[in-house]
Image (tube, grey):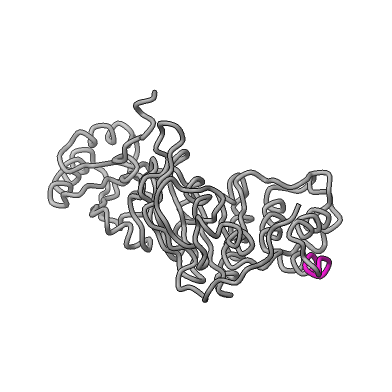
Amino acid sequence: MSLPPTAEAPSEPEFAIDVRGLHKRFGDKHVVNDVSLQVRRGEIFGFLGPNGSGKTTSIRMMCGLLTPDAGSGACLGFDIVKEANQIKRNVGYMTQKFSYWDDLTIRENLDFVARVYGMPNRKAAVDQALENLGLASRAKQLTGSLSGGWKQRLALAACMLHAPRLLLLDEPTAGVDPTARRDFWEQLHALAAQGISVLVSTHYMDEAERCHKLAYIAYGKLLAQGTAAEVIAQQGLTTWAIHGDNLFALSQQLRAMPGVDQTVAFGNAMHVSGTDAAQLESTVQAAATRHGLKLEPVETSLEDAFIYMMKRSQDNFAEQL
């Protein structure tokens, strides 16, 4: 098993990914509906959305692993339909599911991947990958005995073996502890500083905030994209925080009141958001006074914005239920 020879893109493109109007159907289900986005060189681009929103299908189309039903674009300067084989040699793809062999050591797994790529200096490349990802001291450890964080490092090392110019990471930190997640993101920013572009799907808001740009997809449609601040501003929300006890009952009451578009619990506080700033303020001021609760205006968070978008998106599978 081997991949096609490395091909050079016609010139170093401004955008690592530049796709327009991507569509994909599986049977009667419209899984990806008119998705367009651009990822610049050296940019970490966060791809967010609920399970089943079309993230993985979109990523696979962008790197030539899946042919779109409609739409066009380029990945690293190569056409995503006509030059899919050239894209594969220049992209590192990390899937949601850990896909390496538990009964091989870390080194043996990396050596196997190097063989797949037909790398001439296999040992040197594996040694470098082990060193770069802090795996050298565990090189002889069986992969099946590794924790989630160490398996994640192995997967990233395997992605980087052939020196890709673009990383496509599909929920890479799912099930990994917070310390390992933080270390992983430090590694991503180090790679971006070297000019490597990263498209990463995630469910975690703290990870989304560490991306240079974001796109939010729900039920196949791209709802927003830009920096975190731009995505928040696009929703036009004003947010107040109410502090106190027994906020659940108040939350249910507020949702039916004028100016309130959503309520979100945060421990002993509740964020109340709406697009009509004046009406919202009047409603929450009256509620806080009535119940003797502390009230303060706060910045709308990325999580507030995403919950707002999600509640207003239409499930493209709903008619099938």
Q: Which residues are magenta?
A: 121-127
- Please report the residue visible at 40 percent of the width from the left and 59 percent of the height from the top: 37
Q: Please, which residue is most extreme toward the top here?
A: 321
Depth order, front residue of 154/219 = 219
Which of 196/17 is in front?
17
Quadrant in the rendering for residue 114: bottom right
Residue 44: x and y, percent? Answer: 50, 64
Find residue 264 and report its horizontal and vertical position in percent. 34, 42
Q: Name the residue: 28% across, 59% down.
A: 233
Q: Position of residue 309 (x, y in %)?
A: 32, 46
**Quarter residue 272 falls in:** top left
What secondary structure is the magenta-colored segment mainly? helix
Q: Nearer the viewer, residue 222 or 18?
A: 18
Q: Residue at x 57, y 54 (%)?
A: 169
Q: Left or right: where does residue 303 sit relative to residue 261?
A: right
Residue 71 sits inside the magenta stretch? no
Q: Is residue 253 above or below residue 65?
A: above
Q: Is residue 69 above or below residue 155?
A: above
Q: Is residue 186 left or right of residue 314?
A: right
Figure quadrant of the C terminus: top left
Relative to 235, residue 175 above or below: above
Q: Residue at x 70, y 46 (%)?
A: 99
Which x, y percent locates residue 221?
A: 36, 46
